[in-house]
Image (cartoon, coloured by chain):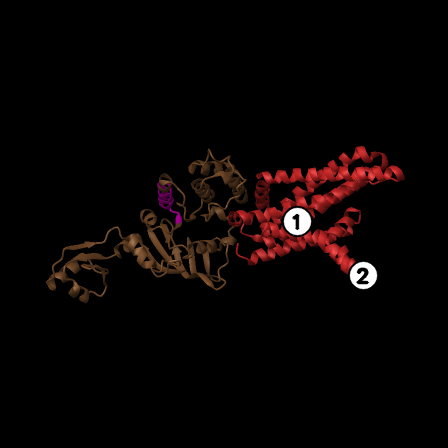
Chain colours: A red, B brown
Amino acid sequence: MNALARAVSAEWLKLRSVRSTWWFAGGALLTMLLVAVLEAEDTAGFLRGQGRPVEPVSSVLEGVEWVQLVFGSFGMLAVTSEYATRGIVVTLACTPSRTRLLLAKTAVVGAAVFVAGGLTAVLGVAASAPLLQRYWEFDAGQVAGRILAMAAYMALVAALALGLGTLIRRSAGTVTVLFVLLYVLPLGLQGVAGSLDVELLVTVAGFTPGPAGERFMAGEPAFGLVLTAWAVAAVVAGVWVMRRRDA
Amino acid sequence: MITLDGLTKRYGGKTAVDDLTLELTPGTVTGFLGPNGAGKSTAMRVILGLDAPTCGTALIGGRRYADLDRPLRTVGALLDARAVHPARSGRDHLRAMALSQDISFSRVEEVLALTGMTDAARRRAGTYSLGMSQRLGIAGALLGDPQVLMLDEPVNGLDPDGVRWIRTLLRSLAAEGRTVFVSSHLMSEMERTADRLIVLGRGRLLADESMERLAAGAGVRVRGPRLLPLAGVLPAARWTGPEELTVTGHTSEQIGRRAHELGLVLYELRPVESSLEESYMRLTANSAEYGAQR
């Protein structure tokens, strides 16, 4: 096995050998089901009067807004928990190349969240079905495409959080920055743009991870590149800093 | 073999390791001794590539640690026994290390058995006592069957049986031709384990001696009613009591002869024996970072 494959298999074992990983998966699923069902009920009540068709993934899209923080925290912990427990000393002794280590961690976290996120979305659609079925036109290909986009979005948010976690090293600080980046920044930019009447800021707000993700999941693949750029930038910055910093 | 050449590490304005040059040879246990904060751990961290040296180099068999392909197969290290994820079992901790080095899981079971951790391997590492954590850390260091072993304070938290076990283990590893580098702030521990001692104080090399030389360096104790003339002719003599001198650099025979020439009465003339601790204290007297000032 080459060095990267070895690091990946080690990181994968590390991830699945702590109970918190499974708590995160369960937490994400529970959050998704709760939000999706509530949202579906809401939509169903609204549609009862209108009789317009609805997209099968509509309620799940709302769920992603919440679940992304769960998966983001999960991605972050892949690094920050190592600093908190000082386990980073052993990890770096095993894999001295910081680039290789973070690539391995990103690959493992990204793949795990892609699978878990996709599964969560599928179950979210299934849970919404009894409430929304009557109003939706189910196109299996389209639904599958949307679910893959959501899974990719959540995986990219987890990678972004992993990069931020590497930069900041502490969990509390990383969650704060992630929250600001995902929720506060776009709203803030739009607010400033509104009061100063600067159209450019609205455009900028649209390219922050949250809004870009919404458009990506709504079926604009180009915004997937924007998200990928965010995640890559965070991980590359993490590698760059880690290479220059004492462990 | 580990080679340090002019190794210096500063954190901000504080110099942790100051121009350290030394070579560690196979087949010996080298004790790395110094008070807390002397720079022992820092030097080890730099050797492992955890911290970058400010200047100088630290090489293992001529290569930097970061350039080793499967480093645990060359260097096994234990720096911090508590540096383990508390929710992961001891066995999974070692298995993850093994996967990163292409080491089989059966080797994991071997080192678990060797360190007496087989029964505890299923438990989460957070439930281990300090002694068990040390054993797990040593299991990790032995995992890759490395030629170089580097252990930072491995006897911390071990019970007397554990201490004896470590001592025997280190001796046998050196006897197999490996390079064993072990740090401690306790001279008494090194006395029984090491062939060679490197004493560090405030980051600087204070002594690099074989065990016997350092023991001999403690001097000869001379007791008598009127020693002033003797102190006058022996510049290396120190008063260690009202009627007592400690002389370094001379054998008992030489001192006895001198005393006879000066016509002095001696009550006692003997080499100071269990004196390693004293030599160590003397060497580090001025360099203890948080030494008692009064």
Return the x and y of residue B154 as percentages of the image width and height: 41, 46
Query: Horizontal and vertical percent for residue B39?
Result: 42, 57
* Badge 2 or badge 1: first in the primary sequence: 1
At 75% from the left and 45% from the top, the residue drawn is A149
Chain under callout 2: A
Q: In the image, what residue type sits under mark 1?
A: Ala
Looking at the picture, does residue B162 appear above or below residue A206? above
Quadrant position of residue B113 = top left
Quadrant occupied by the N terminus of chain A: top right
Label 1 secondary element = helix
Name the element at disc 2: helix
**Which mark identifies residue A159?**
1
Q: Nearer the viewer, residue B131 or A140?
A: B131
Please tell me which residue lies in front, A170 or B269. A170
Magenta portion: prevailing SS class = helix
Amino acid bearing label 2: Glu
Could you tell whether A197 is left or right of B102 in the image?
right
- Residue on which disc 2 sits: A199
Relative horizontal placement of residue A122, taking residue A161 as reference (left or right): right
User: Horizontal and vertical percent for residue A34?
Assistant: 73, 38
* Disc 2: CA contacts within 10 A as few (<14), some (14-19) or many (>=20): few
Residue at left offset 54%, top offset 40%: B88
The magenta segment is B164-180
Q: Quadrant of residue B224?
A: bottom left
> What is the x, y in percent for residue B96?
54, 42
Instruction: Judge whether A140 appears above or below A238 on screen.
Output: above
Task: Give above or below for A234 relative to A145.
Answer: below
